[in-house]
Each structure stands twice: as structure tokens, then as C-alpha cells.
């Protein structure tokens, strides 16, 4: 084997020795001749255990944390590192010639609101002839080109490759949903961001982070480590300071910090009028006060609209231009998405799958109900995903009961857990003596029951899965769409 020095690599990582590098990868199933294989220690498996398979499949070079796993007769190149994840990120960026340097990059992080903000940004920028690529939970897309998304923020190789593909498809801008997992695992460290956004931080992902402080520190990395490493100027950070964790965010001195929210901030809003179809609010910026009509329902969506307008401003689109664009915004898949039908029932699909998101959505619906002086019922259908943070299950049961007139507790993505066990844990959070609920682990049947129970003017909220068109039972994905099921019974 040959000891390999990263500093000796050519800037574009085209060759190692005399061979042209074909691919950077960390999955042996993807290794082809002249690949560089990076051995990653994961939560379920260790890439060092698969080095022989990588060599057999044609790996030209290896990146390892422990050289003892490399066969002594391996004739290729070996780079030892203290952190394979970090090196994978660095090599992926080099291999694709640092595409983020050629794009105006916006990163959005927080427990809730990431997808909504990227959809809003896409619409605002595209409306003003600024082609933007989007990477997030629903999919990856630019113009008419769409790629499937496996997770909120992809692995570094997919991420860097996609940025390059955005450029090839005419994009000058990109918006990325940046998850706490991705920040902790250094998947986006080599992205040179121009603007970063913090939405909020609420209970979620504690199965991974263990506590809220670790969860927050992962998010904080976007605002210090990644901004410090960015070569862009100027740099912007847009932070929701109505959120207690937003007020804790620390920024480097050279970053322009903009705050937003209902309390005193750079972009301060005040709700004027709302119903189930739109919201009117007043926005005060350092320059002006403007009245805005948003086609989105719910106060949480006003936060998302304001954040997207501030991010668009950092990218060269004025507040007034954003206001014009918003007038024909088509909405966001699975984010308080109203199911279109001739029925007078108000049926919404929403991705709310955390206690805070469910509470915000239900309170938004309650506030609209009060605003229009309606006495109609709010009926909620929800469940909790299996193999995920169990602490939120009883909390969500209590929140649904406190903010609904009737609830249907059902299955979400049970994965390898028994859905009945998950339902029992949700049920444990219901108030003593509470009777306004029904249990049905068949999600289709639960949705049907809720819609049948609703009268004209009532609200049915189907929460937890949003845009997803599948249900994971065991380790198998089955086609399932809340939207399609709701349409069937309306």
C-alpha cells in the first residue's frame, strides 16, 4: 500500500497516482473500478468491516480511521484520518470542484418550517428570474428536473453532486434543508453558505441527540463552524428570536444578523386577519412597514413567510417583489394543505409529527376558528412513528386532546414496532377520564371515520405524514397517501 497525503492531491481530485478517479463512495455496493472508498463508522455498521469488498469491487484508494483493517498486500493508496466523515465531505467537494462556490447558497435549519421556507424561497426567486435548486425532505429539484429524496439532507457525495447538477441545469441559487443529523455528521461542512436561517427548536430526535442541549449544539454548528468556513461575503444569518433557542444562537462578528418574529425584531409582524384560506399581516422592517396578504393559513406559516422574505432579500429580491410573488403562491405539499373538494368540510393534511408542530398547527386552526367566530368542531387524526423518539408520544396525545374536539389515534410509520404499543404510549398522555377519542390502527379507516364524523364547516386535521406517499411497516415501504385517502372519502 502507499501512504496518501491529502495535501498532495490535485485541487480537482482528478487523479491519484496515474489513474483517474471514477467515484467517491462510502457504500461498497456502489464501488466501481478506480473508486475512492471511505470507511465510515455508522450507528448500525462499520465501513472498515467492508474494506475487502471495496477492494474486490475495484477501489483504487481507501480512507480509513484504523489502518489495521487494510490488507497488507493492498497495492492501492491509503489515507488515514481521525475523522472519516469529515474527510468524505472534503473529498466529495473536491471531486465535484466545489460547486457551492458557484451558487448563492441558503441553508435552513430548525425542527419545523424548513420545507415550507424552501418552497416559498423557490417560488419567490423563480418569480423574479432567479433559478434556484432545492434540496430537502420532499425531493431535490431545479426547474422541471426532479430527483427523489431519501432524507432531509443527503450524504456529502449526493449533496455535492446535486449542487453540480443544479449548476448544469441553470441554477445560480440553491436552498438546502439542513438537518441536525447532517450537521452532527458533517454532511454539509464543505458547503459555502451565503445565508442561513434558524426557525425554531422543539422536542424531536432525542433518540439520536439524547438531550435538547446536544440537539441545539448540532444546530448551532451551522451558525458558527459552517459560517466561519464559508468563503462568501457578505454573510447573513436570519433567526427567529421568538424561539428561546433562537435567542441563544451565537454568530461570528463578521456575519450580518437579522431577527424575525412577533416580538421586537428586525422583521416584526402583526396578524391583522385570518381564515382557513389566507392570512393578512403587517410586516415592519428596518426600511418600511407593509401590509401583506398570504395565501397560507396559520400563524406558523406567517413565521415561514417572513423568514423566506428576509432570506430572499439577502439574495437580492426586495420585500415588495416578494409580496408580489406571494400573491400566486400555490402552497406547500403536506404543510397545512387543504384538500380540494366540493365538500363544505375543511380537511387539512399536515406533516406535524412533533409535539410543538402539532400544537402550533392546532392552535392556528383554533385561532382561525375564533377569528371567524365559528363554533364548528376540530377533529384530529394522528399517530407517531416507530423506532423514533418515544418521549414525544404521550405529549402529543395530551396536545391533541387539549386542542381538538375529538381525536382519532392511529398508526403512522410503525416501522419495526407494534403499532398498538405506540398507540398505547400516545393514549397514556390523555387526561384522566377523557372520552372524546377513538383508536384504530388502520390509518385508512381512521381517516374515513374522521371525515364521516365531520359536518359542514368542521375542520379535520390529518397530521404526521404530510407529503409522504408511503407507510413503513417493518422495513418495507407500502404506498399510502393521506391526501389520496382523504379525497376518496370527501
Image (cartoon, rainbow, N blue to C red):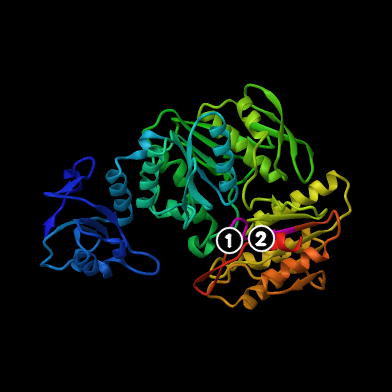
Mark 1 falls on what kind of element? loop
SS state under label 2: helix
* Mark 2 crowd level (few <14, some 14–19, many ≥20, 10 Å Cα): few
| Range drawn in magenta | 461-468
Seen from the viewer's position, the closer of residues 318 and 138 is: 138
Q: Is residue 466 magenta?
A: yes
In this rendering, the answer to whether 236 lies above or below 31 is above
Q: Position of residue 294 (x, y in %)?
A: 70, 37
Residue 245 shows which numbered tag? none
Q: Quadrant of residue 397?
A: bottom right
Of marks 2 and 1, the one in the foreground:
2
Whether tag 2 and tag 1 are in contact, CB under 8 A, the answer is yes
Residue 215, x across and y down, in percent: 51, 55
Q: Residue at x 44, y 46 (%)?
A: 221
Residue pointed to by mark 2? 484
- Binning the other alpha carbons within 10 Å of mark 1 as few (below 14), some (14 to 19) or many (20 upward) gives some
Picture coordinates of residue 446, whole percent (x, y): 72, 69
Q: How many marks?
A: 2
* Residue situated in front as seen by the camera: 362 or 207: 362
Whether 125 is among the magenta residues is no
- The chief SS type of the magenta part is loop
Split into 4 quadrants, where in the image is the N terminus?
bottom left
Q: Residue at x 60, y 33 (%)?
A: 309
Marks 2 and 1, how far apart at CA: 9 Å
The answer to whether 251 is drawn above or below residue 87 in the figure is: above
324 is higher (above) or lower (below) than 59 = above
- Provide residue 289's location: percent of width, then percent of height: 69, 24
Residue at the image position 74 percent from the left and 40 percent from the top = 278
Q: Residue at x 56, y 76 (%)?
A: 417
- The residue that disc 1 covers is 469
Name the quadrant containing residue 261: top right
Mark 2 vs mark 1: which is more N-terminal?
1
Amino acid at each position: 500500500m502507499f501512504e496518501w497525503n491529502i495535501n498532495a492531491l490535485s485541487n480537482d481530485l482528478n487523479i491519484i497516482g496515474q489513474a483517474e478517479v471514477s467515484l467517491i463512495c462510502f457504500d461498497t455496493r456502489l464501488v466501481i473500478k478506480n473508486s475512492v472508498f471511505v470507511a465510515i463508522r455508522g450507528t448500525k455498521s462499520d465501513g472498515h468491516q467492508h474494506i475487502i469488498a471495496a477492494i474486490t469491487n475495484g477501489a483504487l484508494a481507501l480512507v480509513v480511521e484504523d489502518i489495521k483493517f487494510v490488507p497488507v498486500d493492498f497495492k492501492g493508496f491509503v489515507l488515514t484520518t481521525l475523522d472519516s466523515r469529515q474527510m468524505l465531505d472534503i473529498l466529495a467537494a473536491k471531486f465535484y470542484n466545489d460547486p457551492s462556490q458557484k451558487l448563492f447558497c441558503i441553508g435552513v435549519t430548525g425542527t419545523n418550517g424548513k420545507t415550507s421556507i424552501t418552497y416559498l424561497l423557490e417560488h419567490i426567486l423563480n418569480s423574479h428570474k432567479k433559478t434556484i435548486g432545492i434540496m430537502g425532505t420532499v425531493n431535490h429539484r431545479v426547474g422541471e428536473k426532479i430527483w427523489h429524496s431519501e432524507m432531509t439532507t443527503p450524504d456529502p457525495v449526493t449533496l455535492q453532486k446535486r449542487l453540480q447538477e443544479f449548476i448544469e441545469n441553470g441554477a445560480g441559487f440553491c436552498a438546502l434543508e439542513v438537518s441536525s443529523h447532517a450537521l452532527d455528521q458533517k454532511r454539509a461542512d464543505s458547503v459555502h453558505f451565503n445565508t442561513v436561517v434558524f426557525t425554531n427548536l422543539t422536542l424531536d430526535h432525542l433518540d439520536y441527540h439524547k438531550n435538547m442541549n446536544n440537539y441545539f449544539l448540532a444546530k448551532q454548528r451551522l451558525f458558527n463552524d459552517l459560517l466561519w468556513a464559508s468563503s462568501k461575503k457578505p454573510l447573513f444569518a436570519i433567526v427567529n428570536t421568538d424561539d428561546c433557542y433562537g435567542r441563544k444562537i451565537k454568530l461570528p462578528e463578521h456575519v450580518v444578523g437579522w431577527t424575525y418574529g412577533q416580538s421586537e425584531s428586525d422583521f416584526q409582524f402583526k396578524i391583522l386577519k385570518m381564515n382557513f384560506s389566507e392570512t393578512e399581516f403587517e410586516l415592519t422592517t428596518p426600511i418600511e412597514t407593509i401590509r401583506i396578504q398570504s395565501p397560507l393559513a396559520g400563524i406558523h406559516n406567517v413565521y415561514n413567510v417572513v423568514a423566506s422574505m428576509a432570506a430572499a432579500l439577502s439574495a437580492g429580491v426586495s420585500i415588495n417583489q416578494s409580496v408580489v410573488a406571494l400573491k400566486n403562491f400555490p402552497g406547500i405539499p403536506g404543510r397545512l394543505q387543504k384538500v380540494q373538494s366540493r365538500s363544505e368540510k375543511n380537511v387539512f393534511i399536515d406533516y406535524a409529527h412533533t409535539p410543538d408542530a402539532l400544537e402550533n398547527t392546532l392552535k392556528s386552526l383554533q385561532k382561525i376558528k375564533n377569528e371567524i367566530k365559528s363554533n364548528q368542531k376540530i377533529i384530529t387524526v394522528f399517530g407517531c412513528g416507530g423506532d423514533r423518539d418515544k418521549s414525544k408520544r404521550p405529549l402529543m396525545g395530551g396536545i391533541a386532546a387539549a386542542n381538538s374536539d375529538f381525536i382519532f389515534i392511529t398508526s403512522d410509520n410503525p416501522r419495526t414496532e407494534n403499532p398498538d404499543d405506540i398507540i398505547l404510549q400516545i393514549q397514556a398522555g390523555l387526561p384522566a377520564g377523557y372520552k372524546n377519542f377513538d383508536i384504530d390502527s388502520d390509518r385508512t379507516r381512521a381517516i374515513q371515520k374522521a371525515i364521516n364524523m365531520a359536518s359542514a364547516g368542521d375542520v379535520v386535521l390529518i397530521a404526521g405524514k404530510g407529503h409522504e406517499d408511503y407507510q413503513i411497516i417493518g422495513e418495507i415501504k407500502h404506498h399510502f397517501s393521506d391526501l389520496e385517502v382523504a379525497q376518496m372519502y370527501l
